[in-house]
Every structure is written in C-alpha cells, then in structure tokens.
Image (cartoon, rainbow, N blue to C red):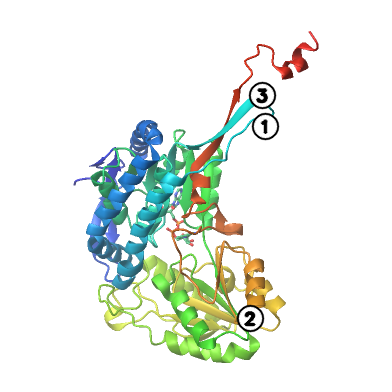
Amino acid sequence: MAGNQYIGGSTRVGTSGATHDVVNPANGSVVATVDLAGPDDVNAAVAAAAEAQRDWGRAAPGVRAAALNELAAVLTARAEEYAQVETSQTGKPIKLSREFDVPGSIDNVSFYAGAARNLEGKASTEYDGAHTSITRREPVGVVGSIAPWNYPLQMAMWKVLPAIAAGNTIVLKPSELTPLTALMLAEDCTKAGIPDGVVNVLTGTGPVAGEALIGHAGVRMVSFTGSTRVGKRIMEIASQTVKRVHLELGGKAPFLVFDDADLDAAINGAVAGALINTGQDCTAATRAYVQRPLYDAFVAGVGDLMSTVRLGDPLDPSTDQGPLVSFAQRDRVAGFIDRARGYGARIVTGGNIPGGALANGAYYEPTLVADIAQDSEIVQDEIFGPVLVVLPFDSDDEGLALANDTPYGLAASAWSRDVMRCMRASREMQAGCVWINDHIPIISEMPHGGYKSSGFGKDMSQYSFDEYTQVKHVSIETEGDARKDWHRTIFGDR
Ligand code: NAD
C-alpha cells in the first residue's frame, strides 16, 4: 500500500493499523481502501507543518501567489479526473462535479492567488507624538482543519487556500468517507511548487485523528466544517490549549415566499435549492414558508416539478440527483420521513427508498412534506437529504419570525418583487447569507459563514483573512530619551 497520509511532501502509511473502505454509494462498490492516521501521524504532520511555516510565513506575498497560480494550472489540467473521483466517492451527479465543484474550486485558487498580495494593514502614525505605531498582519502558525464529506474538494479548498495564502501551514483531515480528492490536492500542491510541509493531509477518523489534531499543542488554530454536534466538541477540546476556533456548522435555510413573488421562479428555485447535491448542502433550501395566497399553487408546482427529477447513475450526464453519500445517511433521511408520517405530515411527493435498478445504491426520492407544525423535528432539525418542508404564513411579520425560528443561521432566501420587502428581509433574516429571488449561488469574492448555531468565522473572500491572520501592534519610540515622559508614573518628579 502506497499510503494515504500526505506529510512533508510525500505519502506514507498511517500508523493506526486500521483501514477504511471508501464506498461508491451509487452501487456499494469499494472505490479505494485507505489506511487511517493515528496520533503518531498527527505528530509527524504537525512537526512537518511547523518546520515549513518558518520559511513559508516569511515568503513574499508574490511568491505565495505564484505558487497558487501554478496550482490552478495543475488542477485545470486534471479537472476531469477530479470530477470523476469526486463523483465516485460521493455519488454526486457528474454534471455537478464538472460544472460546480471542480471549476468552483479552481476559481477559489485563482482568487486566493490575487488575495495573497492584498493583505492590508492600517496606515501607521504617531498617535502620542513619541512613538510610531505599525500594525503587522501575521500568520497564526500551524492550522488544524477538519472537513465534511458533502463537497470534499471544495471544503478542502476553503480550508487550505486562505490558510496558506496568509502564510500559515496546514494539516487537513478530510472526512474518512471521502478523502480521495483532498489527497490528490495535496499531491498537486507539491507538483505546483508549494514547499513540502505547507499542506499536509491525514486520512483518519474524527475521534482518533481529529481529536489528536485539535488537541495538539503545536496547532495554533482550528478550522472546522461539519455538524453543530461535533463543532461543540471541537470547541471544548480547543479550549484546553486556548486555540483560535473557526466553525462552519449545520444549517436549516428558510425559503420565504411573499405573495407578490414570481411564482414560477420560486417553484424552480425551491426545487433546485432543495435538491442540489441531493440536499446535502448546508445552505440548501429546507423550509419553504409561503404566504397564504400562493400556498396551494406553490405546493402543487413544487410537487409536480420534484417528481420530474431524474434519479440515476451519477456518471450519466443526464442524472439530476444521485444517491446520498452513504447508506447510513439514506437511512437517517428515511427515519425523518417515517417519523413525520407518524405525527400526521402529508407527503406531497416522494418519501420512499426507490426500488428497481436503484435499490443497490443509497438513493432516496425527492420529497416534499406539508401539514406539519413549526416545532416538529422535521422543521427544526437538519436532515441533510432531498427533503423540503412547506408551511403557510399570513402576515410579513409572521413569515419573518417563522424563518428565524430555528437554532441555525447559515443561509436564507426571500422571494418578492417589492424592493421594500426584499430590503426588510435582508435586514431581518438571521443568517450569514441572504439571497433575494435566488437560493444557492456562492462566489469566491464573498464571505460564507454562519450566525447562531451555524457557527462563526468566514470562509472565502478577503474576510477569511480575519480568521487566518493575527494583528500585531509594533510601537517604536522615536525621541531617544532615557527617561520617557510616562516614567513619571514610576519616578514621580525626580
Ligand atoms: P460531521 O460533523 O459528522 O463530521 C465532519 C468532520 O468532523 C469529519 O471529518 C469527521 O471525521 C470529523 N469528526 C467527527 N467527530 C469528530 C471529533 N470528535 N473530533 C474531531 N473531528 C471529528 O459532519 P458530516 O456528517 O461530515 O457533514 C455534514 C455536516 O456538515 C452537516 O451538519 C452540514 O451542515 C455541515 N456542513 C457545513 C458547512 C458550512 O459551511 N457551514 C459546509 C458543509 C457541511
């Protein structure tokens, strides 16, 4: 076995002695068997990252930018291979991998190549007349990052790029379910001339490799994307060594349709926004609130459109929706729907594990659920599957209050032709991103991150550097006196 730990610029075999099968959820076949990292691998990776950080942190921004530009070229040459591997380990439709995951990731690289040269500080001056103040924006050091399985390549990018563009080095642990494209990325960083040890990738489980990484004294910052449950555990562990923490957690995005909305646009937006990546998207539309006059037409329209979505082989370019990432995730989704039936919900469309040719994969039908209470678990908890719930509302006040009524706050959308309503919704919706008359698009230039239990800190954009840098005040005395003016507080008038 060549090894699946990428440490200090080369691969090695994990020392835990355990292995993990990466499974294609479309048919249950084993795509690859990876060895899992143990604490010794974490120690080796952090040591390699710490050694590399001294020089990388001092490299001129232009040098870091040049390496990232080269990385973009290397990735572009392998784009189709990345798309194929991403689809085989996640089950996502190949058109999504080709048109969203891979080009989005490469665009991120290009963005950070430019952003690396734009790390600004404030202008300095003599605030008290006797000292010149300078602010330095410095890397934090070694960053430990943990990523989820839903967008493995993009999540690796969101962690690696701002960290290394700012002069940090990184040890990344992707999800053990989907480690393959993160490993390819680490190798390509080396091919692009990024020095050994700047980007290290460990394939391992959360409780073993993840906790060892978060707890390691040599790691100065933790960046985590995943569930709110694990995020709380990450904070607990990180607190023991007072690490900087950046958390991108779960979501339960509302989709608020006012009675003057373009109904056709809202129906299309709801189906696409709910089903992208088989609903395994932290910003996916999950709760539609529709003002009473449009409610019946919206439910009928979404139900009809959902039932036309084509499930199938993710490698077939005509497939709209692939399987869930795993059979366990499929069963979790099915559990939510079965329990909802039990408390009287109406399944407008879907609600089943499909049979026939799809029975060997982790598929679940696109599902619309109505006639449920706001406080039911299917409205409040993150399902992370192809499920949209829909509820009516009467007044604008009521709709906005319902939209904000979950612990989460990652993303939201509002649909209206009235600019005043749109402005009010964008102000009052408690989420790190509010779309108006759309739901899902993200861009490298703009920040992504949560409010409330969806976490804190920003991925992408220039704002991400607030997480991945620390600001130092340097004060230079300019008068040259042995006795400074402020020494009066010690020496009195002597
Ligand atoms: P998860 O929390 O189960 O796992 C995420 C990562 O944490 C994995 O790499 C896992 O191995 C690791 N992990 C698990 N237990 C750990 C522990 N005790 N210590 C350290 N690491 C541990 O999440 P998931 O199921 O992989 O992904 C789905 C979740 O991710 C959803 O809640 C989704 O909303 C969230 N997510 C959020 C964003 C965002 O930007 N806010 C983006 C994508 C996914």
Q: Residue furthest top?
A: 494
Mark 1 packing: few (<14 Cα in 10 Å), some, or many (20+)? Answer: few
Q: Quadrant of ligand 1?
A: bottom left
- Give x and y (percent) for residue 410: 55, 63
- Give x and y (percent) for residue 4: 26, 47
Q: CA distance from mark 2 to mark 3?
A: 56 Å
Q: Is residue 452 left or right of residue 23?
A: right
Mark 2 or 1: in front is 1
User: Could you tell me which secondary element the residue under label 3 belongs to?
Assistant: loop
User: Could you tell me which secondary element the residue under label 1 belongs to?
Assistant: loop
Q: Residue furthest right?
A: 493
Which of the 4 quarters of the picture holds residue 385?
bottom left
Identified by mark 3, the residue type is Ala
Q: CA distance from mark 2 to mark 1?
A: 48 Å
Q: Is any atom of residue 207 visible in this view?
A: no
Residue under label 1, please give it. 127
- Give x and y (percent) for residue 348: 50, 87
Query: Residue 418 shows which numbered tag?
Result: 2
Query: Residue 130 shows which numbered tag?
Result: 3
Q: Is residue 382 above or below residue 343?
A: above
